[in-house]
Image (tube, grey):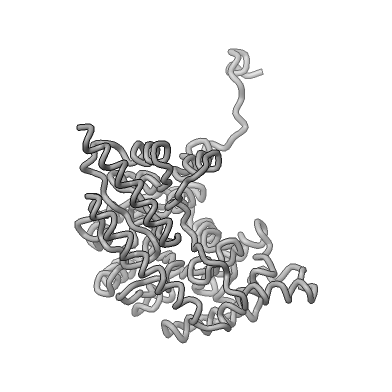
Amino acid sequence: MSNKQEAGQQKSYLSQRVRDLAPSGIRKFFDIIYTMDDVVSLGVGEPDFVTPWRIREAAIYSLEKGYTMYTSNFGLLELRQGISRYLNERYDLSYDPANQVIVTVGASQAIDLAMRAILDPGDEVIIPEPTYVSYVPCVSLSGGIPVTVPTHMENSFRVQPADIEARITPRTKAILMGYPNNPTGAVMPRAEMEQIADIARCHDLIVVSDEIYERLVYGVEHICFASLPGMAERTIHVGGFSKSYAMTGWRIGYACSSPEIIEAIMKVHQYTMMCAPTQGQMAAIEALRSGDGPVEEMREEYNRRRHLMVAGLNRLGLSCLEPQGAFYTFPSIKGLDMSSDEFAERLLMEERVALVPGSAFGPSGEGHVRCCYAVSTEEIEEALERMGRFVGNLKGGR
């Protein structure tokens, strides 16, 4: 028996990496929501639309025909061909569907697989912040070291290329970016993306580009990072069907890169997941086949709600930039003399409005909250009314 056990201390069977992992700052609020009635939620980051019927019908048909077996570890060839064709038509990218495209269980799994495929212990990954909640944990769980780069409201939450370059060390292996951004809605312009591409080439870095919100941009151009000159061979392009096609529960994403990198990603995928769900893959084939109609209809509705939400938050005195992508606003609460966590918890308890504290997305998110406008107009208006009462009471109590 060890001295520790003799002293009466219980042995831990948990990995140190897992013990060091902070719990999601989002989950605790939703655990509370499920115990409450009459909550207006601006917190869940998913479309409120039902998956278009033709996509659902394709999955139903696949079940009726008995397509219930495993697919290739890479995914159905027809789906990979569709993804390759889509990226070629949209961004002039050429990926061989045989060995440069892999279908994953959502874009989140693609990011996890990419980190595990490219990182050795101690490798550093630069991540603009505020950042999607899984980026830092995926790097840490892969043995890497996350190096965050704060972004600020003054720069429209766009990462500054010079700030990335200032954090590069001999251990830097990759840059992990998500634009359009969750939680801020920021979209990077071409000139700044090209500067980041120059930095990646100069320092021989891999770029993992999460572009799950690529179709949800408003009045601006989305820049596909891999389409920049010389970047296709050093970029892992991550995409998926969850946001654009209202297919969050189907869990279908993908990664595209060089044959060497995709083979490495497949190695991890085959031992941990085998393949993405067959019915989801059949549905995704139909999503690509159905064209842009349903996507554009949803995007136009999000755009209308975006204007409603931004105008309402600014009327309440919660300074809010107009997001250019995704379906989130990230208003400032810095004038209210409380943390974002306290603001979110009190708003939920006192007015039954759920949103996410900015601190859930990293330290530079503090002083902000994330509000999702992928909810109905009626819910947005009701949430704004309740938030108005809450903010008014805070200011009146000073």
Res. 175 in view = no
Which quadrant would residue 77 be assigned to in this image?
bottom right
Position of residue 374 measured from the top left corner of the image (x, y, whole percent)? 44, 61
Residue 178, above or below 38 = below
**Tally of numbered discs:** 0
The vertical placement of 73 against 154, above or below, is below
Residue 329 visible (yes or no): yes
Q: Quadrant of the C terminus?
A: top left
The answer to whether residue 35 is left or right of residue 367 is: right
Q: Position of residue 365 (x, y in %)?
A: 32, 48
Which residue occupies 54% across, 74% down? 259
228 on left or right of 115: left
Residue 273, image quadrant: bottom right
Determine the residue located farthest toward the top in the rendered image. Answer: 7
Q: Quick one: quadrant of the N terminus?
A: top right
Q: Position of residue 360 (x, y in %)?
A: 40, 45
User: Can you tell which quarter of the image residue 97 is in?
Assistant: bottom right
Residue 101 horizontal side relative to residue 146, left or right: right
- Frontmost residue, 396 versus 57: 396
**Vertical relation: 78 (above or below) 44:** below
Q: Is residue 299 above or below residue 380?
A: below
Residue at the spot x=39%, y=58% of the render?
A: 182
Where residue 32 appears, as percent x and y from the top left, is: 50, 39
| Residue at 74% across, 68% down | 70
